[in-house]
Image: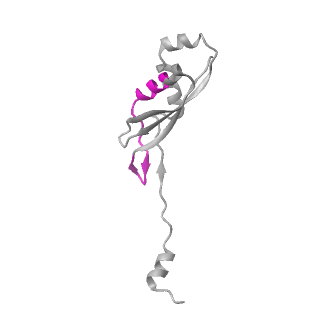
């Protein structure tokens, strides 16, 4: 079977490569952990001392093309008090460095774990 010139050229073309860069909290993961520790409500922390419950709440959100935090929702909870505090924390976060696809800022869905534990 003979192939047309267009078919030969199409087969010779390299596959498209998409460069995807995920959103990043300013300063990276270490800065995010530090921010969470300083922003947890002091009244909440006082209540935390009265319980032995540790856990990780998973919050879903969208980081917009401008870096804002939007569409925040509870993905996996631990208990109502931890869930509410984790939602409050994520909703009050400063702007992130937006994610990019091929160098262009794009909204991207994220999962942010917030861990509560006695220290």
Give the magenta part as a residue range: 84-106
Question: Residue 104: horizontal and vertical position, in percent?
Answer: 38, 51
Looking at the rendering, in which quadrant would you find the N terminus?
bottom right
Find out whether residue 36 is within the magenta segment.
no
Give the residue drawn at x 61%, y 25%: 55
Give the residue drawn at x 49%, y 61%: 17
Looking at the rendering, in which quadrant would you find the C terminus?
top right
Above or below, 7 against 62 in this view is below
Above or below, 105 against 18 in this view is above
Question: Residue 24: horizontal and vertical position, in percent?
Answer: 47, 39
Given residues 108 and 76, the one toward you in this image is 76
Please give left or right for residue 44 compared with residue 67 in the image: right
Give the residue drawn at x 62%, y 21%: 54
Question: Residue 57: horizontal and vertical position, in percent?
Answer: 55, 28
Residue at far bottom of view? 2
Residue at far front of view? 80
Question: Residue 16: horizontal and vertical position, in percent?
Answer: 48, 64
Above or below, 4 against 89 in this view is below
Please give left or right for residue 68 compared with residue 80 in the image: left
Corner quadrant of residue 61: top left
Residue at far left of view? 66
Find out whether residue 96 is within the magenta segment.
yes
- Scheme of colours in the image: one colour
Give the residue drawn at x 48%, y 54%: 19
Circle count: 0
């Amino acid at each position: 079977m003979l192939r047309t010139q267009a078919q030969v050229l199409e087969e010779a073309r390299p596959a498209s490569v998409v460069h995807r860069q995920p959103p990043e909290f300013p300063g990276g993961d270490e800065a995010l952990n530090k921010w969470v520790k300083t922003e947890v409500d002091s009244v909440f922390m006082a209540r935390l001392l009265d319980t032995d419950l540790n856990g990780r709440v998973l919050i879903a959100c969208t980081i917009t093309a401008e870096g804002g935090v939007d569409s925040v929702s509870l993905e996996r909870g631990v208990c109502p008090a931890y869930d509410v505090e984790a939602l409050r924390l994520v909703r009050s976060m400063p702007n992130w460095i937006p994610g990019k696809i091929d160098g262009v800022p794009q909204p991207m869905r994220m999962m942010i774990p917030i861990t509560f534990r006695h220290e």
